Image: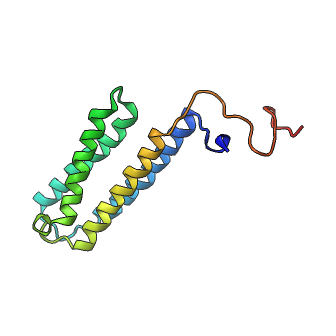
Amino acid sequence: MKGLFARTRRERNGGVDGLNLFFGALLGANLGTFDEVKLSHYILIIAILAVTVVALRMVSAADRRGPVLAMLGTYLAMLFAFAALPHLHPDGLRPGDIHKLVATMAVWVLLSLVLELTPASDERPPPDVRGEDEAGETP
């Protein structure tokens, strides 16, 4: 069973790249609904989102993950405060749009952390469960 979840670092990096591509596009689509938001509020929102995404990517590159995870947690808390506290809602932004934005970021962070924090190695994973040998042949 362990062999089903074994990944190389290159496979993990490919998963992270695909996840970032998908959620980057989804985040852009969410931001496209902010037609009535004042420019100052829009700049604040994209600044918080940009730093959150940068912190998320730094998790994989950091030698010391603790400070980076703390920074990521801080920016996620700011996003959740945006959603939970009505007096922080930017003028012109519908509550549903805020909730979609926060949900997008929460799922992105969760899936990214799962990919980043699960083990990966430079070694080739063991043969699959069908019993193939290293050459891909069944004995």
Task: Tell me, yes or no, if residue 33 can be seen here.
Answer: no
How many numbered marks are there?
0
Position of 58 compared to 41: left or right?
A: right
Q: Nearer the viewer, residue 109 or 101?
A: 109
Residue 63: give x, y in percent of width and height: 36, 26
Q: Using the rendered image of the protein, determine whether residue 107 is visible from the camera's viewpoint.
A: yes
Picture quadrant of residue 88: bottom left
Q: Position of residue 64 (x, y in %)?
A: 33, 28
Residue ranking furthest to the right: 139
Q: Residue at x 36, y 40 (%)?
A: 57
Residue at 27 percent across and 73 percent down: it is: 96
Establish if 10 lies above or below 107: above
Q: Is residue 36 left or right of residue 136?
A: left
Q: Position of residue 100 (x, y in %)?
A: 32, 66
Q: What residue is rendered at 27% in x and 69% in y?
A: 97
**Which residue in the rendered view is the most extreme toward the front?**
1
Q: Quadrant of residue 6?
A: top right
Closer to us: 39 or 11: 11
Which is nearer the eye, 46 or 104?
A: 104
- Horizontal side, residue 125 vs residue 64: left or right: right
Identify the residue shown where x is 10% and y is 58%: 40
Q: Is residue 37 above or below residue 122?
A: below
Q: Quadrant of the C terminus?
A: top right
What colouring method underlies this structural image? rainbow
